[in-house]
Amino acid sequence: MTVDTPELAPLTPGARRVLDAASVLFYENGIHAVGVDTIAEAAGVTKKTLYDRFGSKEALVLSYLQHRDARWRVWVDEFLARHPEPGIDRVLAIFDAAIGWSDDNSPKGCSAVNARAEIPDHATSGLVLPEVTRQKQWLLDRFAELITEAGLSDPGARARELMLLYEGAIVTVGMRTFREPFETARAIAGRLLAT
């Protein structure tokens, strides 16, 4: 079962400026390090406009994560469209998408992982943790669907293996431990799927 993307409401021009500014600031500096005053100033709006459009900083963070995720999913779909026939190449297209995405969009790693790192372990309420979990579950489900379509055995186990490779690669991108981690993860994934 694939986790659906939430329906994103259209944004007013002021809300778009707020979201664009917040997205850059949150990704570059971290969510807790950026205050609403800084976001409002960068967006060229008042704090009142920010709160009128989003209601709270947490709701703004949620919108930031959801809009990034929506862009990522469109990007993935474009890569999957290049491999319309079920098979290993179609499964590996997610890694190809990540290779093309990471330099320009995720040089500091995954926004969802970074947001999760800022949530205290004891936090049980809020909007951000369920959103981060939803995004990661979507990717795991997407891997399983593609593996099933390819007719490969044990799609659940294989999807978990690919998810670990993907997540390790995206963290490595942010940490800059070595170059081209998604290319390495893709090569390993290809070998795993071929066995």
Image (spheres, rainbow, N blue to C red):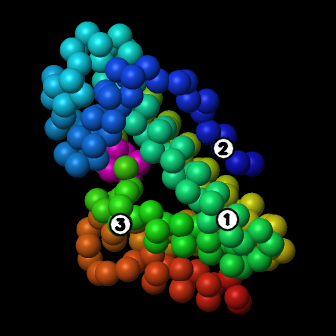
Question: Disc 3 or 1, which lies upstream in sequence?
Answer: 1
User: Circle 3 sits on which residue?
Assistant: 103
Res. 3 mark? 2
User: Would you say residue 86 is visible in this rendering?
Assistant: yes
The region drawn magenta spans: 112-116
95 is higher (above) or lower (below) than 135: below
Residue beneath the point at 47% across and 39% down: 67
* Residue drawn at 21 percent across, 14 percent down: 46
Of the two numbered discs 2 and 1 in the rendering, the one whose residue sits closer to the viewer: 1
What residue is drawn where x is 26% and y is 68%? 175
- Amino acid beneath label 1: Leu
- Residue 48 in the image: x percent, y percent? 26, 10
Q: CA distance from mark 2 to mark 3?
A: 26 Å
Tell me if residue 113 is in the magenta stretch: yes
Query: Is the magenta region chiefly helix, strand or loop?
Result: helix
Q: Which residue is mark 1?
A: 80
N-terminal of the two: label 2 or label 1? Answer: 2
Q: CA distance from mark 3 to mark 1?
A: 19 Å
Q: Residue at x 23, y 40 (%)?
A: 25
- Does residue 113 lie above or below 87 as drawn? above
Residue 162 is situated, as x and y percent measured from the top left of the image, at: 58, 71
Q: CA distance from mark 2 to mark 1?
A: 18 Å
Quadrant of the drawing holding the C terminus: bottom right
Q: What type is the residue that disc 2 sits on?
A: Val
- Which residue is at the front of the view, 63 or 168? 63
Task: Identify the element where label 1 is drawn.
Answer: helix
**Residue 50 lies in quadrant:** top left
Q: Nearer the viewer, mark 2 or mark 3?
A: 3
